[in-house]
Amino acid sequence: MPDFPKALQVRQLAFLVFALLPFGLFAGTVVQPDSAYLIGYSEANGQGGLRFAWSVDNDNWYAIGDNFSFLNSDFGAWGGQKRMFDPYLYQEENGRWHCVWSLNDTIQQFAHAASDNLYEWDRQAYPVVMDAPGNVLSPEVHLSGQAFLVSWRSDGPGAEGVYQLQTDNWSDFSTTEPAAENARRNDRKLIEIAGKERFGNVHRVAWETVDDLIKHYEWMQHHNAERAETMAEDPVRFAGLEALTAEITLQPDQSKAISDKLMGIFFEDISYAADGGLYGELIQNRDFEYDPIDKKYNDPNWNAQMAWSTDGDLDWEIRTDEPIHENNPHYASLNVTGKNAALRNLGWDGIPLQAGASYDLSFFARRPDGRGTLTARLVAPDGSVLAEQRVRSIGKSWTKLTTTFAPERGIDSAQLELRFDKPGRIDLDMISLFPQETFMGRKNGLRKDLAQTIADLNPKFVRFPGGCVAHGDGLANMYRWENTIGPLESRVPQRNLWNYHQTAGLGYFEYFQFCEDIDALPIPVVPAGVPCQNSIMGGHGQQCGVPMEDMDEYVQSVLNLIEYANGPADSEWGKKRAEAGHPEPFNLQYLGVGNEDLITDIFEERFRMIYEAIGARYPEITVIGTTGPFYMGTDYEEGWELARELDIPMVDEHYYVPPGWMVNNQDFYDKYDRNGPKVYLGEYAAHLPGRPMNVETALSEALYLTAVERNGDVVEMTSFAPLLAKEGKTNWNPDLIYFTNTEVKKTVDYYVQQLYGQNAGNEYIPSQVNLSDGNRDVRERVGVSVVRDEATGDVILRMANLLPVAVTASVDPAGLDLRGSATLHVLQGDPTDRDATPTTSEIELGSEVTYEMPAYSFSVIRVAAGK
Ligand code: AHR
């Protein structure tokens, strides 16, 4: 129990009675004032957002909550940058509140947000109101006539003084002007709360206003307590609980159609998922385009020579004059001085080779001083040669040369070695080594075992290329799809916002191809004309937008993508697809616009332009909008409001939540409007402290998905995130599939996704579940979902039991014929078990189905039709 409510109820009661007498407010045994003083303030270091405290006498103050934030500043990159200094509150006569605050003491912007109740805040605005080196300190606001007058101080050298501007809509602002000191109210006050000085402007408000804030705080405490529930407390929570029974009655007469694409995947190049991962290339930094900026200049070893080493009689440098292609400006230029010289690549911490497999080597080379040869080898760490080829015909100008290795010995950690025996200069670029055996044998293809592991999920769609990678770190880093097609040497490599390098070798053509290969719909995500709101490297330090004068070009680029995917082979962009070897369309039906962006005016203006242009030119494309990174809060509310206003067919929701949230919020979608935009739950996962993937996370996802499936008429698609992570290179945990150069490691959660994906249905059959223990904690931990797959006629029963005891279910099929043989899959284990895998068996069902769900288990019974 937090301090404050207790204090209010007990100790302060006597004080309140006494203090309120002068106000004439004491009217019974339980005192509630009609009004109180309210102050909003922030911490001196700007962290922690907007706090509130109240007082009845403007002297003794009580904080609402323990360091509880009612409004967080969303300006700047994650972490330390998001600050709020000197918040100032103003209330209009109609009750609407405005809060302005200073973001820091260096930039030329202030922040504004408005609210009707002081805890649900509308979108924030950060207008640029000064020229550098001016700054915005201690802003304040009040109505002056019809317009809001905002004033602030600046102490930037040469711009010291008071400034002001006017606005009547918080989108358009008058020109900033110097102002007199008396233009300001200067009514912030220093108060003391629990021995700490706080600074803010004080308002006299109705007691309900304070009471609502207290209730909101208490509701959040309750919400957070539910979120924090884990299975670790089960021995206490369920002490004495005995095995249970459940009567499950199916209601086939109330069946409804649900989405046939509920289970898909979201692929993002995070944690080396693409380069060094799914993309089959075995050479690291093949294009010599690694750049210190990839690592934000924090790694002294990260540069264009990274992953390469030399040996013997040569020195080398990176040159940029006359490159193979302007988009690939750097290349290696070797000055060979003797007969014993070598350039080596260590791959992605070693090149894994399989005995008997074939590997294609290709590279561009030139010898400006005359013709030459080189010897290419695959070598073991002890120097022994595993395969060797002589490559001739190196001429004076860039030429692409190829050869194939067939090592007889397999090894986890080979290196590629290029040896030179003739002195002189030799230039090299795009040095590539690919296994011939890629997924589906595609050239420039995907690592077979990883791609197959993904395909085995039976995903109905693939969302790509991100995530944060899609909208990028700053404008220059936004993922531009057209930079990732065409010959590899002409693609534009760039910094990966997860702090490494993207070759774009796995580009849009390869993504579309992969979707087709696994029979999944492609769902590309393009930036909504704004980069990530947490951009650090963009020069702006915040969400900014493609300049309006460039938006036509940007919108056209989005339209071009649709033509590239679906246009005829003789259209401008369809031709590029055909040239890449795919004259047939790629069947693009969905397009994501934006990724959990901050919903600001900057975003909305650009989103509208893109959305309207797609609607006008390609009305058949389903645009997927975005509603921020959370299941509540400003971006969620504003994103949904925009979606309803624009009638966006579908929105992409994201939430990474503790298992406790999933257990306690299974009704989340039951409340959704059946006639509004559909939902794509594009990123979700259960996150436990320490971020393991184990039986607890897997079962909570399985349980939550039973509720999602029940709402499969609103939720059309879901994808767990992130999908892939290379061990030792993870930016984010947990992930669905971990891998090394040679191994693929499926998590427990993978099997849940697979059990749903491989047993999908498109008709939901409701069921009544009566448990022998009706306690809410118990009820919430048993989830049942029954679907039928129209294509096969099979009925699939899913039962998630998150209790520490077995639950014996008697299923009344209510007219459905479930008799005969069925396939049973069971995933079970101790909550902390990270290695549980499902078992599969054949069972016989009678006219009444009885099944014992083991403790901590997820069971799927697939009843084949027509047995
Ligand atoms: O899935 C990892 C990241 O989570 C995604 O890039 C982003 O959209 C979200 O914040």
Image (cartoon, rainbow, N blue to C red):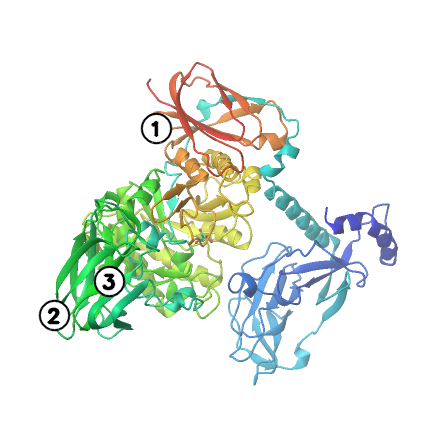
Please give the residue where the numbered disc 3 appears in the rendered image: 430
Q: Give 346 or 340, whichever is nearer the viewer.
A: 340
**Helix, strand or loop at disc 3?**
strand
Amino acid residing under circle 3? Met
Percent of width and height locating residue 508:
29, 54
Amino acid residing under circle 1? Glu
Q: Give 843 or 566, whichever is nearer the viewer.
A: 843
Q: Residues within 10 Å of mark 1 (few under 14, many from 20)?
A: some
Amino acid residing under circle 2? Arg
Please give the residue where the numbered disc 1 appears in the rendered image: 790
Q: Does the Cβ of the disc 2 residue fall within 8 Å of ligand 1?
A: no
| Mark 3 or mark 2, whichever is nearer to me | 2
Is 475 located above or below residue 570 in the figure?
Answer: below
Q: Give 327 or 134, whichever is nearer the viewer.
A: 327
Query: Distance of mark 1 from mark 3, alpha carbons?
Result: 49 Å
Query: Distance of mark 2 from mark 1, alpha carbons?
Result: 66 Å
Percent of width and height locating residue 56:
80, 58
Please give the residue where the numbered disc 2 appears in the rendered image: 371
**Helix, strand or loop at disc 1?**
loop
> Would residue 187 appear left or right of 616 to someone viewing this image?
right
> Would residue 20 appear left or right of 321 to someone viewing this image?
right
